[in-house]
């Protein structure tokens, strides 16, 4: 009996410019949440109320902590490469007078990325952590709602984070790239 193999899967990879062109011509539904990861369009998980509340709470906490020392970037584009554009729940960016009006921020502009993980926890711990490390994001935090813990990914080296810790009682935590600035994460889960 001869083994019959299925035809190979053909993938059509796109870049960030094509991704934006698709949005401009209406190929995505209004409010549709998608990201561009390694040239592929990936659907993002819907956002529940606890997730939204945590993003709002974190936004307030980081805004109060960093003042004008960083830009608090909430669910906005972060271009990691010509074929990777993600929309993290929160990022801290180096200050820039134009507030990134003329170009999306990239890895060199980023101090920290924070994802609030609910149904996306496995994706955020795996794909996203590897992606952020590979592109040199200095710190990546996951507020893991199902585990009721915060995972801190630090010190990227050769495409992976070399310092990963987790805690269920985070307390006051230093903000990366900002000397003597910390954010209180004590009530991250309500």
Image: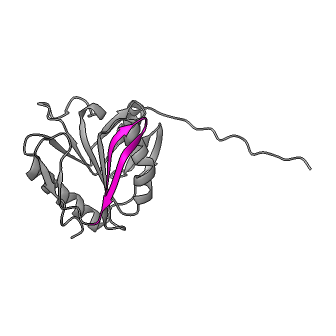
Colouring scheme, one of rainbow, by chain, secondary structure, one colour = one colour
Vertical arrangement, residue 142 with respect to residue 187, above or below: above
Q: Quadrant of the C terminus?
A: bottom left
Q: Is residue 118 something one can see in this rendering?
A: yes
Residue 44, position in %: x, y?
40, 53
The residue that appears at 40% across and 47% down in the rendered structure is 128
Farthest residue to the bottom: give it.
190
Q: Nearer the viewer, residue 162 or 109?
A: 162
Q: State left or right for residue 16 relative to residue 180.
A: right
Q: Nearer the viewer, residue 98 or 171?
A: 171
Q: Is residue 23 something one can see in this rendering?
A: no
Vertical arrangement, residue 176 with respect to residue 15, above or below: below
- Which residues, given as a range, are shown in magenta? 151-168
Total marks in image: 0
Residue 155, position in %: x, y?
32, 41
Farthest residue to the right: give it.
1
Q: State left or right for residue 6 relative to residue 187.
A: right
Q: Nearer the viewer, residue 122 or 11?
A: 122
The residue that appears at 38% across and 44% down in the rendered structure is 162
Q: For residue 11, which quarter of the picture?
A: top right
Vertical arrangement, residue 159 with respect to residue 114, above or below: above
Q: Is residue 164 magenta?
A: yes
Q: Is residue 6 magenta?
A: no
Q: Nearer the viewer, residue 75 or 58?
A: 58
Vertical arrangement, residue 103 with respect to residue 145, above or below: above
Residue 168, position in %: x, y?
28, 66
Helix, strand or loop: magenta stretch: strand
Q: State left or right for residue 129 relative to residue 55.
A: right
């Amino acid at each position: 009996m001869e083994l019959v193999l299925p035809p190979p899967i053909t993938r059509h990879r796109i870049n960030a410019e094509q991704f934006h062109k698709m949005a401009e011509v209406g190929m995505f539904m209004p409010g549709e949440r998608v990201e561009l990861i390694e040239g592929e369009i990936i659907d993002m998980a819907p956002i529940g109320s606890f997730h939204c509340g945590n993003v709002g709470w974190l936004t307030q906490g980081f805004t109060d902590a960093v003042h004008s020392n960083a830009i608090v970037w909430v669910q906005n584009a972060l271009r990691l490469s010509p074929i990777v554009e993600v929309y993290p729940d929160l990022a801290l960016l180096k200050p820039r007078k134009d507030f990134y009006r003329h170009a999306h921020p990239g890895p060199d502009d980023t101090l920290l990325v924070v994802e609030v993980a609910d149904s996306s926890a496995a994706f955020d711990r795996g794909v996203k952590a590897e992606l952020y490390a590979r592109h040199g994001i200095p710190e990546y935090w996951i507020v893991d709602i199902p585990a009721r813990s915060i995972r801190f990914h630090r010190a990227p080296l050769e495409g992976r984070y070399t310092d990963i810790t987790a805690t269920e009682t985070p307390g006051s935590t230093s903000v990366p790239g900002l000397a003597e600035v910390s954010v209180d994460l004590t009530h991250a889960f309500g």
